[in-house]
Amino acid sequence: KQEVTQIPAALSVPEGENLVLNCSFTDSAIYNLQWFRQDPGKGLTSLLLIQSSQREQTSGRLNASLDKSSGRSTLYIAASQPGDSATYLCAVSTNNNNDMRFGAGTRLTVKP
Amino acid sequence: SQTIHQWPATLVQPVGSPLSLECTVEGTSNPNLYWYRQAAGRGLQLLFYSVGIGQISSEVPQNLSASRPQDRQFILSSKKLLLSDSGFYLCAWGGSGLPVWNEQFFGPGTRLTVL
């Protein structure tokens, strides 16, 4: 069964720093991978969706890459801001399983 | 634009009581709908999804059930709540029909505490 792991569990950086969040998955037969942001006590906000045929997607200061063969995705955040502080979740849908699996998330704190 | 609503926002219920959580979507037709649970210390878990009225797929055996009485309405229910049902319940919509796993958009969630 697909397992999704996110490292690190928590990250604290000073404002302005570029950072990378990691997501790994065990089954490379994925349909797509989605990155979300969750603020405390709130629902999830979709950030980027990468289809299995794509290598990366970009939106503003965010760039997500996908390497199916190694079972990894990274979310790159450029010039981080305090408003970026939130928990970032990756989710993977798999061709073989009728399911969408989430990682436990990375809690990001950007200090002014 | 599409909007997804959930209510209530918070709920405190005694063990053994029934449950009904509602989710509605505006601005789209025949959406795929999903219920997730986020329990303390655990990741998001898919509970149910639906590709159309009356069509429900369950991902895990549990004390809960789901129904879709109308095109844009998705209801999560329980006849008797357990302590382990406590958590943050999220409804989402994404695409229409197959494939089931399109980009998903989430509602604000319902915080359920079972005492």
Image (tube, coloured by chain):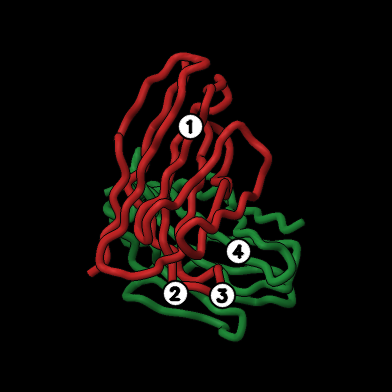
Chain colours: A green, B red
Look at mark 2 in the image and give the residue it sits on: A63
Q: Chain of mark 4?
A: A
Q: Compared to A23, does A32 lie above or below?
A: below
The amino acid beneath tag 3 is Pro
- Whether labels 4 and 2 belong to a single chain: the reply is yes
Identity of the residue drawn at 72% across and 58% down:
A2
- Whether labels 3 and 1 belong to a single chain: the reply is yes
Q: CA distance from mark 3 to mark 1?
A: 28 Å
Identity of the residue drawn at 55% across and 50% down:
B48
Q: Nearer the viewer, residue B45 or B59?
A: B59
Residue A92 disc label? 4
Q: Nearer the viewer, mark 3 or mark 1?
A: 3
Estimate how packed mark 2 is, as few (under 14), some (14 to 19) or many (20 or more) residues with alpha carbons within 10 Å: some
Q: Nearer the viewer, residue B42 or A22?
A: B42
Identity of the residue drawn at 44% across and 64% down:
B104
Mark found first going from the N terminus, 4 or 2? 2
Q: Secondary structure at mark 4?
A: strand
Q: Chain of mark 1?
A: B
Look at mark 1 in the image and give the residue it sits on: B87
Q: Nearer the viewer, mark 1 or mark 4?
A: 1
Residue B9 disc label? none
